[in-house]
Amino acid sequence: MKFKEFNFKTEIMAQIDAVGYKEPTPIQAQAIPVILEGSDILGLAKTGTGKTAAFVLPILEKIATTKGKGKGVRALIIAPTRELAEQINNTVLQLGKQIGIKSLAVYGGTSVKKQVDVLKTGVDIVVGCPGRILDHINQGNLGLTRLEFLVLDEADHMLDMGFLKDIEKIVKHTPKKKQTLFFSATMPKEIKTLAFKVLEKGHKTIEVEYKDPVKLIEHELYHIDHDDKKSKLIELLDDSSIESVIVFTNGKHKARHLSKTLEVKGLKAVNFQGNLSQNQRDAALSGFREGKYNILVATDIAARGLDIPQVTHVINFDLPKTAEAFTHRSGRTGRANKNGIVISFSSLDDKKILTEILKLNKIEFAKVHGNEKDLSKKPIKKYNEKPTNPQNKPKSNRFKKSSNKQQSAKKS
């Protein structure tokens, strides 16, 4: 199947070619015709399936066809994270470049005034996170009386982040007559209930299973005591095969502390978690993409919806709290038909979640290190101590920061 079969406007087709899209992905092939015909959609698709273009392209086509019929926001796209909102907005602007589309991303951590100023000039599409969208609605900055399209992207992730009530409030401000596009990677009970609240009875369900990354990912497991995790992590990071790695933890403070500890060891690490300002988050991601940092120590906000380059390894310093989150973390590697390795640390109190992970993901560990029976029952230390200077530094220079002398030598 080719994109030309959808009969998009010439200007939109030109941008499809410009961004390098060749053939529609399965979710695009199934969803685009249904959206163009005006039906609501329940799309079950994971990150990496091409779902953003699957809803952006038909929305742009329909807006372009009726452009000029009054002012007001025509489409509202809700996403769980600032980074995903920005990525979707960039896709809208790229694909809608030649039809003069006006789009705005709204989320916390950025200037409210600047967003209000742009909203006053008039925009066709608003992409944003639930909290900031609701703020603009309540303050009278964002009117939705002319809304034609409501998109909920990564609904299950928004549920995990506690946005369910905000979403329900936003939906109440939208017109009854609209087209709703609901996307989720998983379908827990709460998401199923929300979906059937916001979708029309005649909605179409589209399910796309994305199997390729699973085949490309090799899993390793370490049965390890909590007290030994940091030393084992540093030992692993000394491996020259680890070129670019995301280290996942279960807490914001732990991510910050662990990143600092690695920095003190001379490693090129940066933390990425919800307590950072938007500028700090942007700097961390751009630094990781550009190779300034090779280690991203993160919470689950980095597990989905981020435009991160090829990651050779994922290390679960802490096993996630849900089996689904393990799937999303693992999906950060093994992308673009490249192999990836996921290394997981499991301590004595991880037995239950490890069983759930194995059951849901149906994975087999290529290597298992240590024995669960040998794990200590000592209490877990809190991450409130300051990182200290090491006596022994890693042998490998792959992750080390360059010294001033080295930098001077390079310049000369």
Image: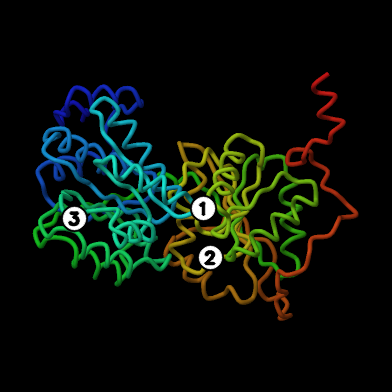
* Pointer 1 with pointer 3, Cβ within 8 A: no
On the image, numbered disc 1 is attached to which residue?
Answer: 302
Mark 3 residue crowding within 10 angstroms, few (<14) / some (14–19) / many (20+) = some
Q: SS at mark 1? A: helix
On the image, numbered disc 2 is attached to which residue?
Answer: 320
On the image, numbered disc 3 is attached to which residue?
Answer: 205
Mark 2 residue crowding within 10 angstroms, few (<14) / some (14–19) / many (20+) = many
Residue 289 vs residue 238: left or right?
left
Q: Quadrant of the C terminus?
A: top right
x and y percentages locating residue 4 in the rendered image: 18, 26
x and y percentages locating residue 212 in the rendered image: 40, 44
**Comes first in the chain, label 1 or label 3:** 3
Q: Quadrant of residue 78?
A: bottom left
Q: Quadrant of the N terminus?
A: top left
Residue 147 vs residue 354: left or right?
left
Q: SS at mark 3? A: strand
Cα–Cα gap, marks 3 and 2: 29 Å
Q: Residue furthest top?
A: 412
